Image (cartoon, helix red, strand yellow):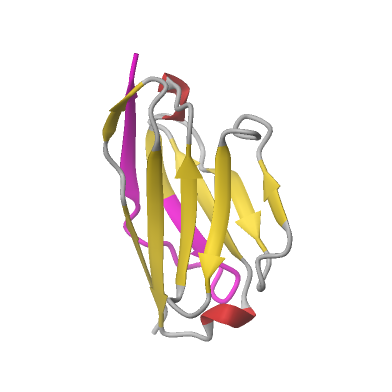
Amino acid sequence: QVQLVESGGDLVQSGGSLRLSCLASGFAFGFYGMSWHRQAPGKERELVANITTGGGRTNYADSVKGRFTISRNNYKNTVYLQMNSLKPEDTAMYYCHSKYNPNYWGPGTQVTVSS
């Protein structure tokens, strides 16, 4: 069955960088668009970025444009989120998501940005 395992979250100071990874299994990864979402305490989950099957097209939330970069390696069944110039408001649980099974969410990885 589909499985998404996020990693790379950490506690970092404002202005710092992190690289999140999401290893996918249980489906033909290269045939599906992927995305990263986040959910802060007391807030709804929001889309951060998405990427097409081949990685040729990406989209970003306005709040992260110019700071975050989504990419993927279809040989490794992995999608990444490079996060630079982190801000305290980026603090959240981060999840990757696949269009293969829209109802499935992995455990997520916690990103905490201190001011």
In percent of width and height, residue 112 lies at 32, 30
Q: Which residues are magenta?
A: 95-115
* Quadrant of the rendering where the N terminus is positioned: bottom left
Q: Find out whether residue 97 is within the magenta segment.
A: yes
Q: Position of residue 102 (x, y in %)?
A: 56, 68
Q: Is residue 38 magenta?
A: no
Residue shown at 70%/49% (left/top)?
59
On screen, residue 93 above or below 31: above
Judge by depth and name the residue closer to the eye, 53 or 27: 53
Query: Is 63 placed left or right of 26 in the picture?
Result: right
Residue lying at the far left in this picture: please name it.
11
Above or below residue 10? Residue 3 is: below
- In x, y percent, where is residue 99? 60, 70
**Residue farthest toward the top in the current orientation of the protein:** 115
| Residue for point 48% across, 27% down | 85
Residue 115 coordinates in the image, percent (x, y): 34, 13
96 or 85: which is nearer to us? 85
At 51% from the left and 38% from the top, the residue drawn is 44
The image quadrant of residue 71 is bottom right
Seen in the image, is 65 located left or right of residue 69? right
